[in-house]
Amino acid sequence: MIHLKAFTHNTIKNILVKTLFLLLLLSAFVFISFRFSVIIDPLNINKDENRQRYTLTSTGSTSMSRLLNVLGEKFSENYNGDYLYEKSETGSGAAINEVINGNYNLGDISRYLTPEEESKKIKKNIIAYDAVVVIVNKRNPIENLSLQEIADIFTRKINNWQIFTNENVKITTIGREEASGTREAFRNAFYTPKKLKAEIELPESGDIVSRVASDKDAIGFVSYPSVNNNNVRILKINGIECNNVNLKNRLYPIIRPFIQVYNDNNYIIEKWFEFIKSDKAKEIIENEKLIPVI
């Protein structure tokens, strides 16, 4: 009877030890698996560990910032905050290299790609079309210029308003900096051997609008959505007004794409471009004075 008790006690003890060991092993496996799933990002997208959210990042064109920030906010709302969108501004010229180097998921370019950029193994999507408009101060009576007249002004062949207004005053030309997609789109609209260049170069379209609004003799080129100042006038070009009808029908002379480039497709980027094609996104694009991609 004593021997039976000892046997039963030892057996139970062994069972308990083995059970405890298996439970500890299982717990360790679950913990390691959980940590691995949190730390490792199989989609190569930044992930917020606390909220379990993915952050899609883009950099490049400043002209695209307003649109992308609005779209990014609605994109996040569309997926209940599981995905976030962060936009940085480095200019169109830097966008592709930033993506190739793995610093950002998307690169924002507000012009057509150059042949050299096209040769790089990178994917692209056009998300909208924008107009580059020419603006003058509201006190300037000019309402229309031809493409040739604009080219002559920005190559300094014409440097005085007298030819247009009978007022003998020097024209002040204002434009964007070298890395700007707006600047390249503006230049590419003109077939002239001499490069168009403004006397004063500013980093953003909004800066140009403000400068022209305060200078009666200034003329500048900017992204259409950035014109929100009553003290400037958008000029007709070749007699064609910049409005939604003329933009949709591609009648306005200076139209450029908003492009996003990326290295490798993945689930989150696919979701982003699916959202861009949605009716909700198209409505946002139109509200921003842009043309959706049909």
Image (tube, rainbow, N blue to C red):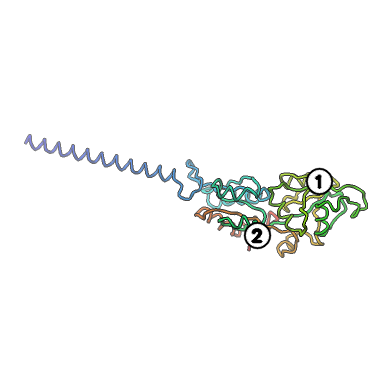
Q: Quadrant of the N terminus?
A: top left
Instruction: Say few, some or many: other residues with alpha carbon within 10 Å of mark 1 (under 14 / 14 to 19 / 20 or more).
Output: many
Q: Position of residue 23 (x, y in %)?
A: 28, 41
Above or below for 68 versus 277:
above
Above or below for 95 versus 250:
above
Q: How many labels does the image show?
A: 2
Task: Between residue 65 and residue 187, name the one nearer to us.
Answer: 187
Q: Position of residue 144 (x, y in %)?
A: 84, 58
Residue at the (66%, 47%) spot, across then down: 91
Residue at the (65%, 60%) spot, across then down: 292
Instruction: Say few, some or many: other residues with alpha carbon within 10 Å of mark 2 (under 14 / 14 to 19 / 20 or more).
Output: many
Task: Between residue 18 and residue 56, name the one nearer to us.
Answer: 56
Give SS at disc 2: strand
Q: In this view, does 108 lie to the left or right of 217?
A: left
Tell me which numbered mark, 2 or 1, is placed earlier along the sequence.
1
Q: Which mark is residue 213?
A: 1
Q: Position of residue 261 (x, y in %)?
A: 59, 54
Q: Where is residue 150 in the image (x, y as percent from the top left)?
A: 81, 55
Identify residue type, mark 1.
Ala
Task: Between residue 132 and residue 229, name the one nearer to us.
Answer: 132
Q: Quadrant location of residue 25?
A: top left
Q: Is residue 48 left or right of residue 19?
A: right
Question: Seen from this angle, which residue lies furthest bottom?
Answer: 249
Residue of label 2 = 292
Question: Seen from this angle, which residue lies furthest left?
Answer: 1
Q: Which mark is residue 19?
A: none
Residue at the (39%, 44%) spot, across then down: 34
Identify residue type, mark 2.
Pro
Give SS at disc 1: helix
Q: Between marks 2 and 1, how big is the CA–CA gap?
A: 29 Å
